[in-house]
Image: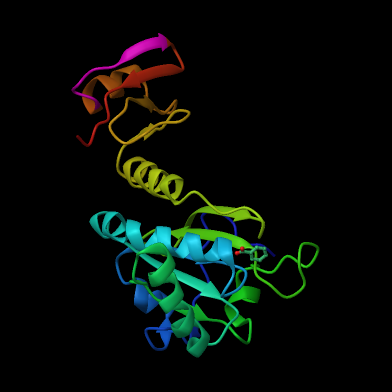
Amino acid sequence: MAIQLGDTVPDFVQESTAGPVKFHDWLGNSWGILFSHPKNFTPVCTTELGAVAKLKPEFDKRNVKVIGLSCDAVVDHEKWAKDIEETQGAKLNFPLIADADRKVSNLYGMIHPNADNTMTVRSVFIVGPDKKLKLTLTYPASTGRNFDEVLRVVDSLQLTAGYKVATPVNWKNGQDCIIVPAVTDAEADKAFPKGYKKIKPYLRVTPQPNL
Ligand code: BEZ
């Protein structure tokens, strides 16, 4: 059965470019992003890993650890890392899991047999400090992901974990938020000292509360 939002994500031990990773211990108290890509030495994956390496300082600022995965051996990851640095101008600065035996891929349902029997699809699992799954994305091999979007959803997940707000369509960090419907107006008056605009009884807009 697929891992669902709110589930504790499966723990595992697997080889990586940073040595053996025991996933839950490796996460510690951080947020985490585990993402798979189909195969080493492939063009779209090369661009994705370069993009994640460039965004690493942004993930660090947000207390998010990133870890990639493909079903290739560590020795191949290390060779490919040189190509990534050469072609994308970014050194691989996060671990890559070497899931040659497909242990983690199968545990997390990253192989979708009707898309491809052997290669992992482009999965993203965002995990909270409580080890619970907060968000998943699944893209096919042919479509590279937008990691700026991954960073944007991290901002939303972290904000909404701490305040009774939700983020509206196309929201970006710094923009107004929605007060969740479960909060009464009387509660909102106390909880949102910057005030709020009541457009409809169910649509109340407030400045981002953590700024
Ligand atoms: C790529 O990363 O370019 C790729 C990998 C597998 C299938 C198609 C494209």
Q: Which residue in the rendered view is the most extreme toward the front?
A: 86
Q: Which residue in the rendered view is the most extreme toward the right?
A: 114
Q: Which residue in the rendered view is the most extreme toward the top?
A: 199
Left or right placement of residue 140 versus residue 115 in this view: left
Percent coordinates x, y for residue 127 in the rendering:
43, 60
In percent of the image, x 41 and y 58: which residue is there? 51
Tell me which segment is drawn in magenta. 192-199
Residue 197: say if magenta. Answer: yes
| SS assignment for the magenta stretch, majority | loop
In percent of the image, x 51 and y 60: which residue is there? 125
Front residue of this view, candidates 132 and 106? 106
Percent coordinates x, y for residue 143 in the rendering:
62, 53
In what quadrant does ligand 1 lie? bottom right
Q: Quadrant of the N terminus?
A: bottom right
Residue 122 location, quadrant: bottom right
- Residue 39 drawn above or below residue 13: above
- Residue 44 drawn above or below residue 147: below
Percent coordinates x, y for residue 148 in the rendering:
41, 47
In percent of the image, x 30 and y 43: which residue is there? 162
In percent of the image, x 53 and y 59: which residue is there? 124
Query: How many numbered badges does the structure rendering display?
Result: 0
Front residue of this view, candidates 86 and 177? 86
- Could you tell me if residue 32 is visible in this image? no
Residue 192 location, quadrant: top left
- Residue 122 drawn above or below residue 188: below
Percent coordinates x, y for residue 196 in the rendering:
29, 16
Front residue of this view, candidates 53 and 35? 53
Front residue of this view, candidates 87 and 194? 87
